Image: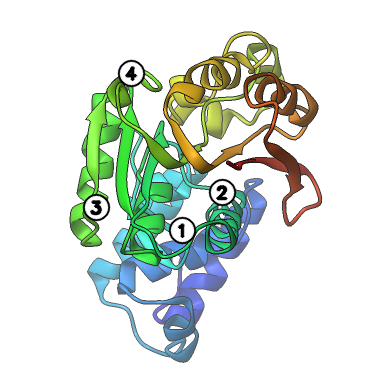
């Protein structure tokens, strides 16, 4: 039974309700930030503030919607990525913290590999646009093109670019097809990489709500890496950088695809913050 009036009481009720129903209590904070339209630190400063009847009702409804199985990011319609808030809905995957490391790793390598020349970057399979938009806003001198096979995903990505004032060229199409005939200095991709037989180990929250065409891939999750390795040599300038997010068991196989296609390149498998192999960087030198 809800008997709270202020922010702290609401958070305490929601935390207990979430834990009792097998959910993480962090969702309470995410929903409260959404209700108040503010940051976590601001919420903490206003724990004694009284909520309106409308705020209490919306808070309760969103918490209950999440407990029914919908990811909290879809309930509130947004997720934080690289310090910015991105619109998310069921047309796109919810951006993960590990993917921020792909952005950071790319920027670090870019600064070492290239001089001050104007660089052209492609983000293949952009989804919400998190990678492409973050790269453009962190490195405004980049020309950024983002592709996706899903019209609905591209529409969401375009909303994010508009909201965050990022100038991105969005193109509809499969893998490198929308980039045909052009040359790039940097190509990034976080493609679907989960093998179909791994579905049984995944949470129902993900399986029932996140788009399967952005999660799963054939050939044990490796088909899109193989295709990218085959297609990218025709698109890359020299020097050039390719950065990919991978499933944590796929490092050696994906690295081999790129060694076959770029025998002179420096290829590294990088671990994420949890110590799992999560990224492949392929540095192509002259």
- Quadrant of the image containing the C terminus: top right
**Label 1 crowd bin: few (<14), some (14–19), many (20+), radius 10 Å:** some
Q: Is residue 275 left or right of residue 114?
A: right
Whether pointer 1 and pointer 4 mark residues with C-beta atoms closer than 8 Å, the reply is: no
Q: Secondary structure at mark 4?
A: helix
Q: Is residue 64 left or right of residue 230?
A: left
Q: Earlier in the sequence, mark 3 or mark 1?
A: 1
Q: Residue at x 42, y 62 (%)?
A: 31
Eye-nearest disc, 3 or 1: 3
Whether pointer 2 and pointer 3 mark residues with C-beta atoms closer than 8 Å, the reply is: no
| Res. 174 image quadrant | top left
In the image, residue 95 lies at what x, y percent? Answer: 48, 47
Name the residue at the front extreme. Answer: 286
Q: Is residue 105 above or below residue 144?
A: below
How far apart are the alpha carbons under marks 2 and 3?
18 Å
The residue under label 2 is: 99
Which color scheme is applied? rainbow
Q: Residue at x 81, y 51 (%)?
A: 275
How far apart are the alpha carbons under marks 3 and 4?
22 Å
Q: Earlier in the sequence, mark 2 or mark 1?
A: 1
Which disc is residue 161 wearing? 3
**Label 4 crowd bin: few (<14), some (14–19), many (20+), radius 10 Å:** few
The residue under label 1 is: 81
178 or 198, nearer to the observer:
178
């Amino acid at each position: 039974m809800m008997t709270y009036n202020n922010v702290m009481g609401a958070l305490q009720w929601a935390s207990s309700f979430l834990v009792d129903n097998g959910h993480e209590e962090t969702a309470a904070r995410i929903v409260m930030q959404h209700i108040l339209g503010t940051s976590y630190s601001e919420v903490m400063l206003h724990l004694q503030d009284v909520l309106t009847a409308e705020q209490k009702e919306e808070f309760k409804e969103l918490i209950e919607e999440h407990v029914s199985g919908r990811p909290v990011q879809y309930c509130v319609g947004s997720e934080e990525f690289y310090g910015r808030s991105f619109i998310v809905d069921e047309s796109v995957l919810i951006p993960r913290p590990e993917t921020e490391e792909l952005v950071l790793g790319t920027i670090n390598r870019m600064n070492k590999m290239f001089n001050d020349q104007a660089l052209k970057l492609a983000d293949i399979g952009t989804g919400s646009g998190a990678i492409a938009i973050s790269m453009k806003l962190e490195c405004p001198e980049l020309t950024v093109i983002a592709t996706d096979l899903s019209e609905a995903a591209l529409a969401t990505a375009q909303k994010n670019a508009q909201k965050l004032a990022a100038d991105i060229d969005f193109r509809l199409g499969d893998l490198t097809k929308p980039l045909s005939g052009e040359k790039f200095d940097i190509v990034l991709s976080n493609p679907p990489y989960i093998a179909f037989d791994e579905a049984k180990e995944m949470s129902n929250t993900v399986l029932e709500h996140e788009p399967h065409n952005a999660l799963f891939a054939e050939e044990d999750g490796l088909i899109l890496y193989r295709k990218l390795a085959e297609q990218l040599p025709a698109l890359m300038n020299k020097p050039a950088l390719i950065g990919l997010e991978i499933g944590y068991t796929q490092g050696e196989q994906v690295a081999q695809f790129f060694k076959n296609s770029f025998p002179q390149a420096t290829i590294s498998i990088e671990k994420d913050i949890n110590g799992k192999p999560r990224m492949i960087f392929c540095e192509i030198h002259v």
